[in-house]
């Protein structure tokens, strides 16, 4: 289920249900042909800080990049403070985790340049394993006009 802002009753924590400037940046990028064309679904085992990302294709500023299936690792949690991280893909298909700053009132980190956001990750204090309810799908699905499909070889 692409791009989500959950209702507060469905969220693990209230911050997952609060749209902010990063959410607006993700949505706005989609209107400028930056987002996910296909795939890039996430899965977690709940046994570690690893998120598996399925293969897919992203579009960054109108240019396609293939994303190979693979894992990204969320950095160690702070001992006493929570944070939000972003799972992103660059304009050349490289997956990454951008860590936010641990805080009593955490906010999302800035979206890295030339990247598309796939997921927001809530990292509670002292966490040792990422569960599916810690992920919020932020994939903005973009649809290319037919003339672009030929250009990109689709």
Image (cartoon, rainbow, N blue to C red):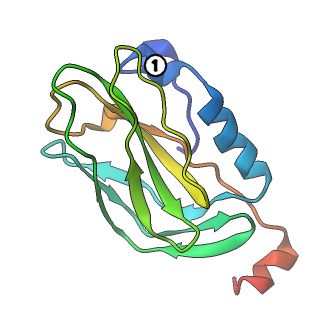
Q: Position of residue 107 (x, y in %)?
A: 47, 26
Determine whether 113 is above or below 25 in the image.
Answer: below
Q: Position of residue 51 (x, y in %)?
A: 29, 52
Write the residue at 34% across / 14% down.
104
> Is 91 placed left or right of 79 in the picture?
right
Question: Where is residue 76, by image quadrant?
Answer: top left
> Is 17 placed left or right of 135 in the picture?
right
Binning the other alpha carbons within 10 Å of mark 1 as few (below 14), some (14 to 19) or many (20 upward) gives some
Question: Where is residue 103, by image quadrant?
Answer: top left
> Is 118 placed left or right of 68 in the picture?
right
Determine whether 10 is above or below 3 in the image.
Answer: above
Determine whether 70 is above or below 117 in the image.
Answer: below
Residue at image mark 1: 15
Nearest the eye: 14 or 80: 80
Write the residue at 26% across / 25% down.
124
Determine whether 57 is above or below 100 in the image.
Answer: below
> Is 149 placed left or right of 70 in the picture?
right
Write the residue at 38% across / 31% down.
101
Nearest the eye: 12 or 15: 15
Q: Position of residue 23 (x, y in %)?
A: 62, 34
Write the residue at 58% across / 41% down.
3
Q: Which image quarter is the C terminus in?
A: bottom right
Q: SS for tag 1?
A: helix
Nearest the eye: 74 or 70: 74
Q: Position of residue 74 (x, y in %)?
A: 27, 47
């Amino acid at each position: 289920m692409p791009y989500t802002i959950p209702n507060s009753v469905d969220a693990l924590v209230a911050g997952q249900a609060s749209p902010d400037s990063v959410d607006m940046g993700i949505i706005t990028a989609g209107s400028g042909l930056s987002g996910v064309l296909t795939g890039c679904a996430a899965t977690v085992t709940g046994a570690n800080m690893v998120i598996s990302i399925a293969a897919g294709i992203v579009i960054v500023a109108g240019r396609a990049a293939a994303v190979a299936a693979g894992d990204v690792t969320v950095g160690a949690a702070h001992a006493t403070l929570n944070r939000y991280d972003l799972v992103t893909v660059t304009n050349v298909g490289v997956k990454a985790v951008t860590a936010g700053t641990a805080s009593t009132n955490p906010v999302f980190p800035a979206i890295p340049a030339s990247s598309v956001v796939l997921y927001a990750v809530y990292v509670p204090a002292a966490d040792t394993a990422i569960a599916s309810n810690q992920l919020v799908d932020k994939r903005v699905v973009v649809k290319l006009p037919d003339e672009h499909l030929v250009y990109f070889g689709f």
